[in-house]
Image (cartoon, grey):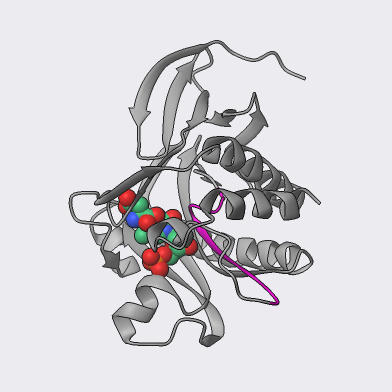
Amino acid sequence: MDSTPAKLEMFYEGKAKKLYTTSDPDLIVQYFKDDATAFNAQKRGTIEEKGVVNNRMSELFFTLLEREGVQTHFVRRLDDREMLCRRLEIIPVETVVRNIVAGSLAKRLGRQEGEELKHPFVEYYYKSDPLGDPLIYPEHAIAFGWATEQDLNTIHEMALRINGILRRFLDARDVILVDFKLEFGRHHGKILLGDEICPDTCRFWDKATRQKLDKDRFRRDLGGVEEAYHEMLRRVEH
Ligand code: TMP
Ligand code: ASP
């Protein structure tokens, strides 16, 4: 295994993660915090051990995706809360894939949460805290120069492939993948999957009971938040 570069300066602190430069300009360290926010940080809290669970779960999902030929920023997990990643120039567009109606889709279009969709689809949101991540058309991203048409075609194709891989994997573990959010970035001209894949960024429902095993337990004050994160990790590890 290659030697680990030295962790240098923190260059970004977000709501759930901190990023550090390293002695290798191509690599960064992603540190996972326990801090949780919802509704554009109007609600704040801590989910104990969340950083540890999200780091380990992201490692497992990124490893699965890499094995299936999806290129990601993941290099390796360093310890409980840190992973080594390729440095990305992040595209300021959040990509959401939906299999079942929930969350903002249910609200925006007045649909029942849990309604089956005829087929999965991809949505794009502009990554902007002051604006609360508004829903956009792909044309907006192209017209404002956030991504090219070719980038968006690549992202769309990768997002649906990732959905297929994760759905199959989770179905075998009695989990329904309702929806999830992805972030992509450029690394030496190539588009890689970045960020994290965990109960903060996905909706996971138990297949038999439809019990929520994700951050909606925190967003909606349902209780049993830590237990749900640990239960999801247990299922993904087996
Ligand atoms: P939504 O239904 O609230 O639009 O969320 C869709 C999916 O995206 C859901 O799995 C949670 C995830 N998500 C994030 O990861 N970050 C966010 O800021 C939001 C709003 C949603
Ligand atoms: N809206 C995000 C979420 O619910 C978090 C936030 O924006 O503070 O996951």
Q: Residue at x 38, y 47 (%)?
A: 91
Does residue 206 show up magenta in the picture?
yes
- Over which residues does the magenta segment extend? 197-208
Looking at the rendering, which quadrant does residue 78 occupy? top right
Tell me if residue 13 comes above or below residue 177 in the rendering.
above
Ligand 1 falls in quadrant = bottom left
Q: Residue at x 53, y 36 (%)?
A: 51
Does residue 170 show up magenta in the picture?
no
Most extreme residue toward the left is 130
Q: Residue at x 35, y 72 (%)?
A: 104
- Residue 156: x and y in percent read 50, 65
- Residue 213: x and y in percent read 58, 61
- Residue 162: x and y in percent read 62, 60
Tell me if residue 226 comes above or below residue 209 in the rendering.
above
> Of residues 105 and 5, which is closer to you in this image?
105
Tell me if residue 99 comes above or below residue 37 in the rendering.
below
> Of residues 200 and 69, which is closer to you in this image?
200
Q: Residue at x 52, y 59 (%)?
A: 202
Looking at the rendering, which quadrant does residue 199 occupy? bottom right
- Residue 6: x and y in percent read 55, 10
**60 left or right of 27?**
right
Tell me if residue 211 comes above or below residue 126 in the rendering.
below
Most extreme residue toward the front is 223
Residue 198 appears in the rendering: yes
**232 left or right of 221?**
right
> Of residues 194 and 143, which is closer to you in this image?
194
